[in-house]
Image (cartoon, grey):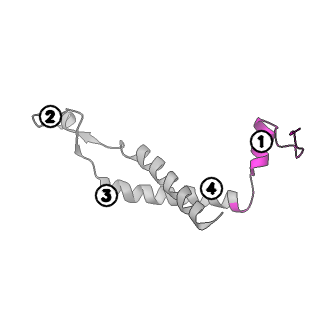
Amino acid sequence: MGITSAIVLFAVIWFMTFLCVIPIRLKTQGDLGDVVPGTHAGSPEVHNLKRKAWITTGIAFVLWAAIASIILFEVITVRDIDGWMFDRMDGTSHVN
């Protein structure tokens, strides 16, 4: 895996994790009973985005290290996945 692939893998993991972490312990205006006129009751009042970004970074780093290790040490390869699901990569060419 090259450096660009590693960065892209980390970015994908980070954003997927961030989207899962954002709603945790979110306090909306409706929950607190203080809805600003012109806004939705589901609008966040207390979001703690900076803290959630740091938590996301820690979780994403652990996940990235595990997935990158699996890729680099070839614990699971594309051929393994193909063998389990499709069985199309048998090594012979099917082109006439």
> If you read the primary sequence from the N terminus, does the residue marked by circle 1 or circle 4 appear first?
4
The residue pinned by badge 3 equals: 50
The residues bearing labels 2 and 4 have C-alpha atoms spaced at a distance of 43 Å
Q: Is residue 93 magenta?
A: yes
Which of discs 1 and 4 lies nearer the camera? The answer is 1
Give the residue type that dot 2 points to: Gly
Q: Check disc 4: other Cα within 10 Å, few if <14, some if 14-19, many if 20+.
A: some
Report helix, strand or loop for mark 2.
Answer: loop
Which of discs 2 and 3 lies nearer the camera? The answer is 3
Q: Quadrant of residue 95?
A: top right
The residue pinned by badge 1 equals: 82
Q: Position of residue 35 (x, y in %)?
A: 13, 35
Res 33 label: 2
The residue pinned by badge 4 equals: 67
Give the residue type that dot 1 points to: Asp
> If you read the primary sequence from the N terminus, does the residue marked by circle 2 or circle 3 appear first?
2
> If you read the primary sequence from the N terminus, does the residue marked by circle 3 or circle 1 appear first?
3
Residue occupying image coordinates x 16% and y 35%: 39
Report helix, strand or loop for mark 3.
Answer: helix
Report helix, strand or loop for mark 1.
Answer: helix
Give the residue type that dot 3 points to: Lys
Is 77 positioned to the left or the right of 42 in the image? right
Query: Which image quarter is the C terminus in?
Result: top right
Q: Position of residue 22 (x, y in %)?
A: 36, 46
